[in-house]
Image (spheres, helix red, strand yellow):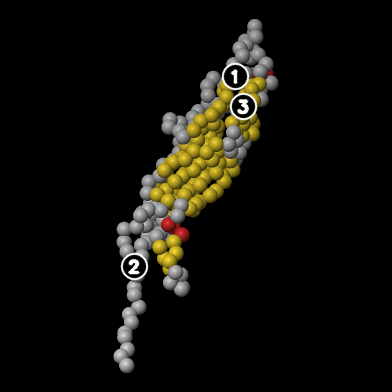
Amino acid sequence: MAYLEYTEPNVCIGENLTTDEAGQLLLQPHSVPRPVVDVRAAAAGDGTVYSTTALPGKLLIDRQISHRNDTPLEQQMFLRVTRASRSLITSNPNAIQFRDRWTYAVDAEPELPNPTGYFNGKSGAALDVGTNSVAEPNPGVLWYWSPTNSIDEWLDPLEPGQQIRVWYRCYVWTPDPWSDNANKNNPVHDARANWARLQLWLYPQVGELIR
């Protein structure tokens, strides 16, 4: 009786695939969009506002995040910045403004995010209802509130082994001219940025090698 020889086949699969112990085909974790960083950076210094007329202003939030691509494929990076609801109180005739900015770099330190010139976002409030006959600001206080909002940005692709660093900062600024006797010598000024949520997502790319 003749016996036939059998050879166990070897099957090549792409970098986005793998197998379990039983040889069943599975997706690699990096083959689907996935969050890799998710942090909430609380504001330090929320509360009473004093004259800060020099840009960039008073620093409220300062946070850096990073991630290294530990996959065998290039990964597209996606950044989402969520700003908490923010509130301001300003008195006649003053103005208060939030400004924020973020920068990023691959395998390097990102540039200091200074929103003096270029910025990613700003919001603020101002009130001017004039003065009385002796040049005192008339009574007046303005309450301002902005809702939670998110903004997204696609970043540079990240090669295997590369590390991306993102640096976020938020400031509060009081533009000139600033009146110390606002609201007829009863000034009320307050600014609350609360927090910012920073999220990094990786999006998979098509593989180039077969193993």
Residue under the image location 40 percent in, 44 percent down:
155
**Disc 1 and disc 3: Cα gap in Å?**
11 Å
In this view of the protein, which residue sits in the foreground, 117 or 159? 159
Q: Is residue 61 visible?
A: no
Q: Position of residue 145 (x, y in %)?
A: 61, 29
- Up/down of 111 relative to 20, above or below: above
Residue under the image location 69 percent in, 21 percent down:
186
Q: Is residue 7 visible?
A: yes
Q: Amino acid at mark 2?
A: Cys
**Disc 3 and disc 2: Cα gap in Å?**
61 Å
Q: Secondary structure at mark 1?
A: loop
Residue under the image location 35 percent in, 78 percent down:
8
Name the residue beneath numbered marker 2. Answer: 12
Q: Amino acid at mark 1?
A: Leu
| N-terminal-most mark, 3 or 2 | 2
Q: Position of residue 96 (x, y in %)?
A: 57, 26
Q: Amino acid at mark 3?
A: Tyr
Q: Residues within 10 Å of mark 3 (few under 14, many from 20)?
A: some
Q: Quadrant of the N terminus?
A: bottom left
Mark seen at residue 127: 1
Quarter of the view holding residue 114: top left
Q: Dots 3 and 2: beta carbons under 8 Å?
A: no
Name the residue beneath numbered marker 3. Answer: 144
| N-terminal-most mark, 1 or 2 | 2
Question: Is 144 positioned to the left or the right of 8 in the image?
Answer: right
